[in-house]
Amino acid sequence: MTTATERRDGESWTLLQTMLEEQFTLHTHRLTELTVSARLPRRGGYDDRTLEASAAAARQGIADTAHALRRMSEGTYGRCEECSRPIPLGRLRAQPHARYCTPCHRSR
């Protein structure tokens, strides 16, 4: 099985970085929209709970993708933060911000 760290300089690595950057941008735009909606008289059609839950999800998405991009720049991206084993490329394609291999994620 090919791991992300084995393909660090390859096309897959570039694709993962692009995906993370796009996710960061999308979450940032979403949070901006929700912040503006929260200031509108009728909350932009959102009820308070939905607005807060959506904003919290956007903030978490920003944090997750920023953390993954930081790990990528540090050279630790693609390694499990728990056991240090390589995270399979398929898992990273499905969840580019994945911090743990599947066994460690399940045990958490």
Image (cartoon, rainbow, N blue to C red):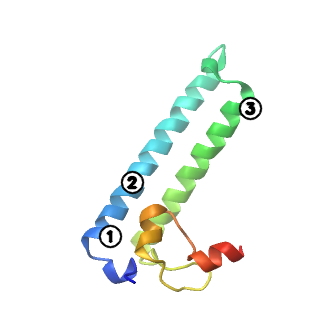
Question: Residue 24: image x %, image y %?
Answer: 45, 50
Residue positioned 42% across, 70% down in the render: 90
| Badge 1 amino acid | Trp
Instruction: Please tell me whether mark 3 sits on a helix, a strand or a loop.
Output: helix
Residue positioned 36% across, 62% down in the render: 17
Instruction: Please tell me whether mark 2 sits on a helix, a strand or a loop.
Output: helix
| Badge 2 amino acid | Glu
| Badge 3 amino acid | Arg
Residue found farthest to the top: 41
Mark 2 surroundings: few (<14), some (14-19) or many (≥20) residues within 10 A: some
Q: Earlier in the sequence, mark 3 or mark 1?
A: 1
**Residue 21: assigned label:** 2
Residue positioned 39% across, 81% down in the render: 5
For the C terminus, the quadrant is: bottom right
**Residue 13: assigned label:** 1
Question: Residue 97: image x %, image y %?
Answer: 50, 63
Question: Residue 71: image x %, image y %?
Answer: 47, 71
Q: Earlier in the sequence, mark 1 or mark 2?
A: 1
- According to the image, label 3 marks what residue? 49
Mark 3 surroundings: few (<14), some (14-19) or many (≥20) residues within 10 A: few
Q: In this view, does 105 lie to the left or right of 79?
A: right
Q: In this view, does 102 lie above or below 84?
A: above
Q: How far apart are marks 3 and 1 (CA)?
A: 38 Å
Q: Are marks 1 and 2 in contact (CB under 8 Å)?
A: no
